[in-house]
Amino acid sequence: MNDFLYRGVLQPYQVRVSYGVTTGVVRDAVLAHATDPVASHLLARALTAGVLASPLLGEDEWFTMRWNYEGDLQSIVLDVDEHARIRGFIAPKLLMEHVESEESLYGGGGKVSVTKSTSVKVLNSGTTEAALLDVVEDLAHFFSYSDQIETAMVAMVGFNPDPNDPVSLCQGLMIQALPDCDLELFDALRRGLNSAEVRRLLSVPPEVDNHFEHVFKAMLQSIPEAVFDLRLSVAGEPQFRCRCSLERICDVVAVLPDAELEEMIESDKFLSVDCRFCSRQYRLTPDQLRTILQTKRSISA
């Protein structure tokens, strides 16, 4: 089953929704970064939350999201665009041997920062306290507090014992209150979103085309005489895709001082540069470094 993302509105209640399956995205990220089970679980939840938020973006826009905590989990960083193409990393990527408890994982607190950008400028940015000590709930809190849009999210992750196919399922659901939404009703939907039945449905693979209807109807059970009127459209096919390239890596290397570049050229050794977002390794030859230095000097001349 391919990953997918739907967006829509629960019409009677004026609630924006996004629902997605991100199994492939998470699998590709876990394999790329070789994360251990604890780090994989956290990265999976953050990536799924990022995908669920992508329908909030317009054309040529993307979010850069950063979670920073005070415990053994130091940070998670990701970028996601309007097509649900996402990349990200977690630090450290090996957590099992360090974490003794949930308290030691997150420490005493942290912060969540989100920046919305285009290819030419930063549109807006904000930071909130990561008071809930959960990557998904802390991002929902960010949108509720910083953007003043009541938001709730849930993401469920399942793993296989196979190191070559480590992710069995990952899917999630986000709801947001539109301007005419009754906030008391939204709180009821939030409780429904976190119900045992919704979590159970998100923990099993969609076996029928209308699986999402069962998920939303389970959420609506928290509302007496609920009316099910859900209008969905395809919002994209989530992909773990990095924007790194040899050209961009060369631009980064060009920032190094001339003397440092000259020393690397004279050593006649390869320069290895790893992309943090996808763990791809670039190896620059002395000739490539020489070209970078010559280009840099010609521009500054």
Image (cartoon, rainbow, N blue to C red):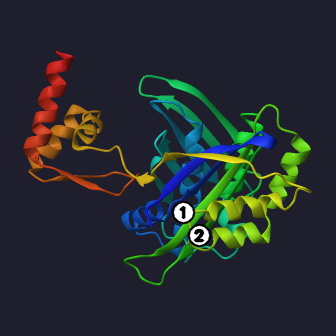
Q: Nearer the viewer, residue 123 or 203?
A: 203
Residue 110 appears anywhere in the view? no
* Front one among 175 and 274: 175
The numbered mark, 1 or 2, whose residue comes first in the sequence reads 1
Q: Residue at x 37, y 50 (%)?
A: 241
Residue 4 position within the rendered picture, expressed as x and y whole percent measured from the top left? 49, 55
Residue at (87, 41) in percent of width and height: 183
Q: Is residue 115 left or right of residue 263?
A: right
Q: Is residue 79 visible?
A: yes
| Quadrant assignment for the C terminus | top left
Residue 206 pos. (x, y %): 57, 69
- Kind of element beneath mark 1: helix
Q: Is residue 267 left or right of residue 173?
A: left
| Residue picked out by circle 2 | 157
Give the label, 1 or 2, closer to the camera.
2
The answer to whether the residue labelled 1 contacts the one labelled 2, judged by CB atoms less than 8 Å apart, is yes
10 Å neighbourhood of mark 2: few (<14), some, or many (≥20)?
many
Amino acid type of the residue that numbered disc 1 sits on in the rendered structure = Ala
Quarter holding residue 57: top right
Give me the disc on residue 186.
Answer: none
Label 1 and label 2: CA atoms lie apart by 7 Å
Q: Is residue 221 left or right of residue 118?
A: right
Q: In the image, what residue occupies the spot 91% across and 45% down?
A: 184
Query: Which numbered tag is attached to residue 44?
Result: 1
Number of marks in the rendered image: 2
